[in-house]
Image: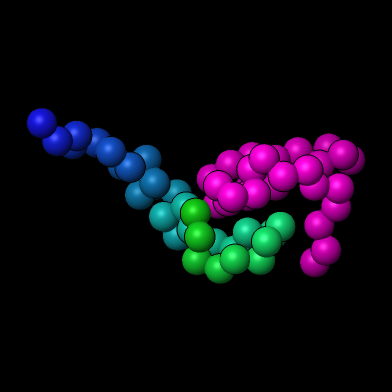
Amino acid sequence: MSKQNRGKALWNLQSRGRGTCPVCKTERIKVLYDKTLGDGTKLKVCKRCRNKKIQCVEK
């Protein structure tokens, strides 16, 4: 049987959870994962960047 509520929480997020990843600069990708930098700053990153070691992010 199919799942009725799969991905339903994404509809409540801004832009359906999509944006630009601050690490790899990929656009229109889901940025759902929290990552904490060395100085305590929290970032939302994509699935590909969630396991990368990040020192700082250039803006």
Along the viewing direction, whichever of 16 and 35 lies nearer the viewer: 35
Residue extending furthest toward the right: 39
Position of residue 2 relative to residue 17, above or below, is above
| Left or right side of 24 for 18 | left
Which residue ends up furthest to the left in the rendered image?
1
The part of the image, by quadrant, that contains residue 24 is: bottom right
Position of residue 50 measured from the top left corner of the image (x, y, whole percent)? 64, 43
Quadrant in the picture for the N terminus: top left
Magenta residues, as a range? 31-59
User: Considering only vertical position in the picture, is 24 above or below 2?
Assistant: below
At x 66% / y 66%, what residue is drawn? 25
State yes or no: residue 52 in magenta: yes
Q: Judge left or right: residue 45 versus residue 56.
A: left
Name the residue furthest top.
Answer: 1
Q: Position of residue 35 (x, y in %)?
A: 70, 40
User: Residue 15 colored magenta?
Assistant: no
Place of residue 34 in the rendered image (x, y in percent of width and height, measured from the top left) = 64, 40
Q: Quadrant of the C terminus?
A: bottom right
Residue at image position (67%, 40%) is: 51
Q: Image check: 5 left or right of 44?
A: left
